[in-house]
Amino acid sequence: MTFIIGLTTASAQVDQITKHSGEIVKGKVVRVEEYTIVFKYDGEDAENTLSKYAIEKVVYGKSGRVEDMTEKIVINGEEDWEKVVILEDKGYSAGLKKGGEVRGKTGLINFQTGNTGDRKAEKKLKMDAAKIGCPFILLTSDKATVGADSNELGGSQVIKKGIGYKY
């Protein structure tokens, strides 16, 4: 009887991390950072990292306290492009699944200023990601050419490339 009570008490102190994909990770949360959670799997000593974007909630085993992390972003098609989030660091994609490559660019001949060209390329990048159902983009290339480096007409061209990520 004492063994069963001890086993129940030990398992009750394990933290549960619920991912947006439905997967439940059991372990010990070491620390919660701004964009990531560092944890150890139950029975292991190695530290692992998950992006907060991949996590719905954490249930702490000792106290039973539930901490909501992020809301799931649902992309139903290209019209949901405004919901797409651009990730600034590769670590922010930990726990997310790689989708496909995405690209956004302005035309070679255009009448855009640097700032409007950048926004237009970002919009096209997000639309490309939304088209394949990816709510996240890890930016891999952000290139802008202006004046004589861009084209003979002196316009500017912006090209953004990234990798789409899903839950």
Image (cartoon, rainbow, N blue to C red):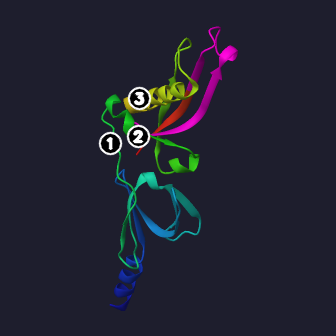
Q: Which mark is residue 74?
A: 1
Q: Which mark is residue 127?
A: 3
Q: Amino acid at mark 3?
A: Met
Disc 2 crowd, CA 10 A, few/some/many (<14, 14-19, 20+) = many
In the displayed structure image, the side of residue 142 where residue 16 appears, left or right: left
Give coordinates of residue 155: x percent, y percent: 60, 15
Question: Which residue sits at x=54%, y=33%?
Answer: 162
Relative to residue 154, is residue 84 depicted above or below? below
Question: Which residue sits at x=55%, y=60%?
Answer: 48
In this rendering, does residue 164 appear at all? Answer: yes
The magenta-colored residue range is 132-159
Mark 1 touches mark 2? (CB < 8 Å): yes
Mark 3 touches mark 1? (CB < 8 Å): no
Secondary structure type for disc 3: helix
Q: Amino acid at mark 1?
A: Val
In this rendering, does residue 133 appear at all? Answer: no
- Measure how far apart labels 3 and 1 are at the Cα level: 14 Å
Secondary structure type for disc 1: loop
Q: Quick one: label 1 or label 2, which is nearer the N terminus?
A: 1
